[in-house]
Amino acid sequence: MIAVFWPQYWIKREMKKHGEERSDFPGTGGELAQHLVEHFGLTGVGVEETDRGDHYDPQDKMVRLSADNFHKASLTGVAVAAHEVGHALQDYHQEKGLRLRQWLVGIASVTDKIASVFFLAAPVLAVFARTPAAFFGLVAFGVALLAIRIVVHLITLPVEYDASFNKALPILQEGGYLHESDLKGARSVLKAAAFTYVAGALMSLLDLARWIRILR
């Protein structure tokens, strides 16, 4: 339980720690994102506020930031904005990691629904599976469906790392968008942004273990 919930706690703590308004910053996270989109010539990419968490949508070509990060001039807002623009750059350059992740996300959205129906119907299916081998085959099928989501999270990790440390951090550092004294805090925020999917993978593992325990 500690391994699953500690990453979520740490991510929220780091985001909150650096989320205070800064009077010495020239703009908000939303303004920086819009500036970077124009600076890198990302034609067709937009920036907007969302209530569904910070992310970049490759289908709509949209950098979406939460209200705080969009409207506040904070270190968290600036770093997260740069991170999401990093994903827009990956999409613009058609990098394989992002394309693979999007393909797997499409598959996982379908297999998650199938897995939910499957596990709800498992007791009924068990009646028709008259042999232990058939029952365990059904269980293995259900586990494999849920495991696809874990694979998606694992594929996502290098994509997130690249957006944080090969894209966002050099942009903030070399572009002079942050003072040298703020770079350490920016690294922590960018690490938290990438680490979000570690927490997601661990939650998926917990969900998988829960279903296995129920079926046992």
Image (cartoon, grey):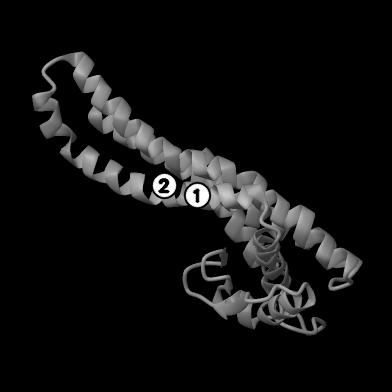
Residue for badge 1:
103
Q: Quadrant of residue 62?
A: bottom right
Within 10 Å of disc 1 (Cα), the crowding (few <14, some 14-19, many 20+) is few
What element does badge 2 sit on?
A: helix
Residue at image position (72%, 51%) is: 162
Residue toward you, 95 or 202: 95
Q: Position of residue 18 (x, y in %)?
A: 70, 67
Is the residue 60 above or below the residue 170 in the image?
below
Which mark, residue 107?
2
Residue toward you, 73 or 169: 169
Q: Position of residue 207 (x, y in %)?
A: 37, 40
Q: Position of residue 81 (x, y in %)?
A: 68, 70
| Residue 7 visible in this rendered orientation of the protein | no
Q: In the image, 75: left or right of 134?
A: right
Is the residue 66 above or below the residue 116 in the image?
below
What element does badge 1 sit on?
A: helix
Within 10 Å of disc 2 (Cα), the crowding (few <14, some 14-19, many 20+) is some
Residue at image position (22%, 15%) is: 133
Mark 1 belongs to which amino acid?
Answer: Trp
Q: In the image, 10: left or right of 52?
A: right
From mark 2 to mark 1, how far is it between C-alphas? 7 Å
Q: Position of residue 197 (x, y in %)?
A: 56, 49
Residue at image position (89%, 72%) is: 176
In the picture, which quadrant includes the C terminus? top left
Mark 2 belongs to which amino acid?
Answer: Ile
Which mark, residue 131?
none
Q: Quadrant of residue 94?
A: bottom right
Is the residue 73 above or below the residue 138 in the image?
below
